[in-house]
Amino acid sequence: MIDASGPRVLKGHGTENDFVVLPDPDGSVWPEDRLDAALVRRLCDRQAGLGADGVLRVVPSALVPDAADVLGEHLDACTWFMDHRNADGSHAEMCGNGIRLYLHVLLAEGLLSAEEARAGVLVGTRGGPRRVGAGADGYWVDMGPARPLGRGEARVAGRSYPGTGVSMGNPHLVCLTDEPLESFDLTRAPAVDPALFPDGVNVELVNVLVAEEGPAGTTAHVRLRVSERGVGETRSCGTGACAAAWAALDAGGRHAGTVTVDVPGGRLSVEVTEQTTVLTGPAVVVGAGSFTPEWLG
């Protein structure tokens, strides 16, 4: 019989943006010196590991060394912290798809009640506190306001595409284009100006569609592909959907509205106001199990 006596592990996704989820409710299973960049890369390897766009560690905020620095006065209000790592092992500030899955796991693991989820709870991230909750249309997260970062450009296959820099707690460069998204080769990350984005950037290539073809109440309708910093192309990006929604509204002279965002992994809804941005979409746990000692070491 296979020895699967290692720590528990979950696999899940939000619109096919997939994650290895590591339950660590007392902070003893995956301390920083164990969950290092090399192990994260192994976990996310789609041939030699479980395969994922990133890793989410489910841990109390009080047990995360840098939580006090990023949460400040909100530390006590954030019982749980989404310790998010990119596939290359680097720390990530925020992930809209990941935090919906994170809430789903808190519910499924009995770490949060259904009543608390419906009311919404604050979850700590390296992008600051985020309020997330459960609703009739899936899980929603208050992503905070979009912040414009200025103009830039991305180079894809030797061609330049102008874009708008947008921060959603992490940096994005949104390039609106009429070219079919299927025509872009994103096997290599688009080149950007390192002076404008010294820590790298997520690049979204976006087609603006006819709003009337979206669900009722849609102000704008977009389709996007994304190359994520530290990961590569993914099937979806929650913060990227929010950045694209804001950029599409801004290009049309609007500052608020409901934007339907189609990604390769499904459909998201983004409500933009002058005060904040709310992302809504699904999340699912695909499987649960345990590591084998022979792989984990």
Image (cartoon, rainbow, N blue to C red):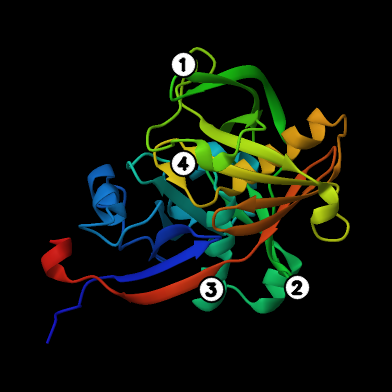
Residue 145 in sight from this viewpoint: no
- Give the total number of marks visible in the rendering: 4
The circle on residue 136 is: 2
Whichever of labels 1 and 4 marks the residue nearer the N terminus, that label is 4
Q: Residues within 10 Å of mark 3 (few under 14, many from 20)?
A: few
Local SS, label 2: loop
Question: Along the horizontal axis of the image, is 9 left or right of 80?
Answer: left
From what the image shows, is residue 195 above or below residue 233? above
Residue 130 in the image: state x and y as whole percent: 65, 50
Q: Residues within 10 Å of mark 1 (few under 14, many from 20)?
A: few
Q: Which residue in the structure is indicated by mark 4?
A: 92
Q: Amino acid at mark 4?
A: Ala
Q: Relative to the observer, which residue lies in front, 23 or 47?
A: 47
Q: Amino acid at mark 2?
A: Ala
Q: Which residue in the structure is indicated by mark 1?
A: 194
Local SS, label 4: loop
Residue 290, image quadrant: bottom left
**C-alpha gap between disc 1 and disc 4:** 18 Å
Whichever of labels 4 and 2 marks the residue nearer the N terminus, that label is 4
Whichever of labels 1 and 2 marks the residue nearer the N terminus, that label is 2
Q: Which residue in the structure is indicated by mark 3?
A: 111
- Seen as rendered, the residue at the extreme bottom is 1
